[in-house]
């Protein structure tokens, strides 16, 4: 799928619903969330999406922090909106990794950052802080998520060059989301 189509889908939802939590976005998209407790070790899944009887379902690891669950649900919503779930089960183990991975995972990451992060807010925060990591903290995202947003903005000519960091390949499995309050996401 073209980046322009991913951006169009994400911005269309943002215009229609505003930026809501991942849980609220799933409800608005009529995606059922099935909560499980597989743990947080390196072999545990974060989430996966599947379609059954024309209903989209996300199986979500409730052992993740509320902030992590929120980011995972944006990503899984991307799979639903981009119709990846029609291809079978799509598992999310290493969300927002920048190493080689399937096209569908990259597209879901791009959808998530285009939906959640406003270009003008990212640019203003980068300018104000002059720090990639402070920008991620202020915008309440992981550095790896900001890497994906940076690349999308560079694609559209809003930023030049590559992001100043490389995200680790297992970045979603090791998020701590310090500073994100549990109550912010309705869990």
Image: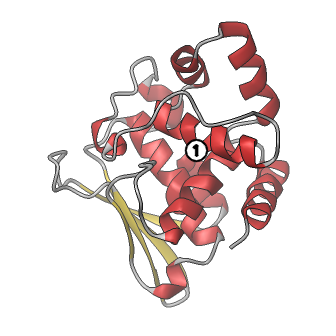
Q: What crowding class fits label 1: few (fewer than 14 Cα within 10 Å), some (14-19), or many (20 or more)?
A: many
Residue 83 spot, x, y in % from top left: 61, 78
Q: Which residue is mark 1?
A: 148
Residue lying at the far front in this picture: please name it: 161
Q: Against 163, is 116 above or below?
A: below
Which colour style is shown? secondary structure
**Residue 183 versus residue 44: which sits nearer the camera?**
44
The foreground one among 88 and 107 is 107
In the rendered image of this protein, does residue 64 appear above or below residue 165? below
- Residue 182's spot in the image, x, y percent? 42, 27
- From the top left corner, tell me how far across and down residue 1 is, in percent: 68, 73
- Comparing 119 with 90, the one in front is 119
Image position of 36 with respect to 160: above or below: below
Q: Quadrant of residue 16?
A: bottom right
Q: Is residue 142 visible?
A: no
Q: Split into 4 quadrants, where in the image is the C terminus?
A: top left
| Depth order, front residue of 143/33 | 143
Residue drawn at (25%, 44%) of the image:
63
Q: Is residue 20 left or right of residue 52?
A: right
**Relative to 142, is 130 on the left or the right?**
right
SS type, badge 1 = helix
Which residue is outermost to the top?
A: 129
The residue sitting at 39% across, 79% down in the picture is 89
State whether residue 48 appears in this view: yes
Quarter-of-image position of residue 146:
top right
Q: What count of labels does the image hold?
A: 1
Residue drawn at (26%, 58%) of the image: 45
Residue 43 % position (x, y): 16, 56
Q: Residue at the location (74% across, 14% down)?
A: 127
Residue 62 in the figure: left or right of residue 23: left
Q: Is residue 12 left or right of residue 57?
A: right
């Amino acid at each position: 799928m073209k980046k322009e189509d991913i951006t169009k889908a994400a911005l269309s939802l943002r215009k229609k619903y505003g930026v809501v939590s991942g849980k609220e976005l799933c409800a608005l998209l009529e995606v059922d969330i099935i909560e499980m407790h597989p743990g947080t070790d390196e072999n545990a899944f974060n989430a996966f999406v599947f379609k059954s009887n024309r209903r989209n379902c996300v199986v979500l690891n409730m052992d993740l922090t509320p902030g992590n669950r929120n980011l995972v649900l944006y990503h899984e919503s991307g799979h639903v909106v981009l119709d990846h779930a029609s291809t079978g089960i799509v598992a999310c183990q290493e969300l927002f990794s920048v190493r080689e991975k399937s096209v569908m995972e990259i597209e879901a990451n791009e959808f998530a950052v285009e939906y959640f992060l406003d270009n003008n807010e990212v640019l203003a925060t980068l300018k104000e802080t002059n720090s990639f990591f402070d920008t991620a903290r202020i915008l309440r995202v992981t550095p790896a998520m900001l890497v994906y947003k940076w690349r999308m903005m560079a694609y559209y000519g809003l930023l030049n060059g590559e992001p100043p960091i490389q995200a680790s390949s297992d970045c979603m499995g090791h998020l701590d989301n310090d500073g994100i309050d549990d109550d912010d996401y309705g869990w």
